[in-house]
Amino acid sequence: MPAVESGPRPLLSFAEARRGKPPEHLADLDVAERKDRVAKAGFPAFRADQLSRHYFEHFDVDPERMTDLPARGREELVSTFLPPLLTKVRDLTADRGLTIKSLWRMFDGAMVETVLMKYPDRATLCISSQAGCGMACPFCATGQGGLTRNLSAGEIVEQVRCGMLAAARGDLGEPCRLTNVVFMGMGEPLANWKQVLKALRRIIEPSPAGFGLSARNVTVSTVGMAPLIEKLAEQGMPVTLAISLHAPDNELRDPLIPINSRFNVGRLLDAARSYFAKTGRRVSVEYALIRDMNDHKWRAQLLADELNRRGRGWAHVNPIPLNPTPGSIWTASTPEAQNTFVQTLLDAGIPTTIRDTRGSDIDGACGQLAAEVTRSSARAAKAAEAAELVRRGSGADGPKGVLR
Ligand code: SF4
């Protein structure tokens, strides 16, 4: 039985339904474990290093091209240590070919998505850490379906390999290098702590251990599992931390982000501030601007006050414009409200940049992944119920609750 925490609606779920495990993959293992497994399978241990270089340097899983491995046993070595983990179902492109959203099927039929985006100075891959998500944020298509299961480290890393390969072979118009990885797809990364941590090591450590991306170019985005933010700061991997705040007051954030009932705004901001103190990495504060719900000037001021109260220069706010959705309560702020919100933060000395919403026309922006996969009328009803709770908490007349 999944463990479900009952409390204010909607429900949070932290445990996945029982399912089989994906096959073990080279990317699940560190260098020493790989050597050990390869030797136990009857091959010389140094074959682990050769396989790792094919995978992490050349993004290759085709035994035909691994001519440094002896023909005899090559197929077996590759099928044992590089089993296929993701099967592409389809690609959708947007932004004149500069954004590609891919849907992938895993061994048990569960689906995840990735979004690959090319910018003038970088290429970024948005990856998923869970199939579905148990955080139940009412505005998020993924959250409406609940948690299907955690991904293995291998399944997370394989998304990156596929993105690296796609960028290198020119799928985004011309060959380029994948420079950035963001955990902003399906799932709450910190709720899949062990596997995400392993995957981060594979993404950051240099070959043959991993891909060797700069830690600062890897972003872990969380809705607010504060104790795990503190634990992440202890791992010696100064990745960029993004917190999806979306409201500076508990009265609104409780229904908007249900985990807030466990770790409230004050607790979250304290954890984020301590992440900056330990890692030196400035924290990104993500704030989706929703018309008449969280886009009031007083909320911008409250956000600025809460950030400044904890020091200067440790956080950067990214307001995220939503798509206009006529008739929905989750719709875009007016340009005037957006400008006032941003200017209020800037006037208070908070670095603020409106975030690019690449891929929004293909449901590839944050919180939109897998919409068509997970939607159902029952879930839509649940979302509507949660939305009503949010509406009641969104008061435009000034703060009623006290932070912390
Ligand atoms: S917004 Fe993020 S944490 Fe919330 S339900 Fe969606 S995927 Fe999960």
Image: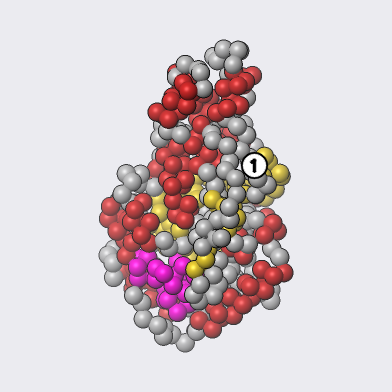
Nearer-the-camera pick, 312 or 246: 246
Compared to residue 103, the image places residue 293 above or below, namely: below
User: How would you rate the neighbour count of disc 1 (Cα within 10 Å): few for under 14, some for 14-19, many for 20 or more?
Assistant: some
Nearer-the-camera pick, 202 or 82: 82
Q: Amino acid at mark 1?
A: Phe
Total of numbered circles in the picture? Answer: 1
Image quarter where the N terminus lies is bottom right
> Residue lying furthest front in this view?
1
Nearer-the-camera pick, 127 or 380: 380
Q: Which residues are magenta?
A: 245-269
Q: Residue 209, image x and y in percent?
A: 43, 31
Residue 211 on the magenta segment: no
Q: Label 1 belongs to which residue?
A: 107
Nearer-the-camera pick, 305 or 45: 45
The residue at the point 47 percent across, 45 percent down is: 195
The residue at the point 65 percent across, 56 percent down is: 370
Q: Residue 123, image x and y in percent?
A: 53, 42
Which image quadrant for residue 366? bottom right
Compared to residue 56, the image places residue 370 above or below, namely: below
State whether residue 60 appears in this view: no
Tell me: 311 left or right of 323.
left
The residue at the point 48 percent across, 77 percent down is: 252
The residue at the point 54 percent across, 50 percent down is: 150
Q: Residue 224, image x and y in percent?
A: 43, 63
Compared to residue 232, the image places residue 223 above or below, namely: below
Tell me: 212 left or right of 144.
left
Residue 247 on the magenta segment: yes
State whether residue 275 appears in this view: yes
Tell me: 65 left or right of 46.
right
Tell me: 334 left or right of 254.
right
Q: Which structural element holds mark 1? A: loop
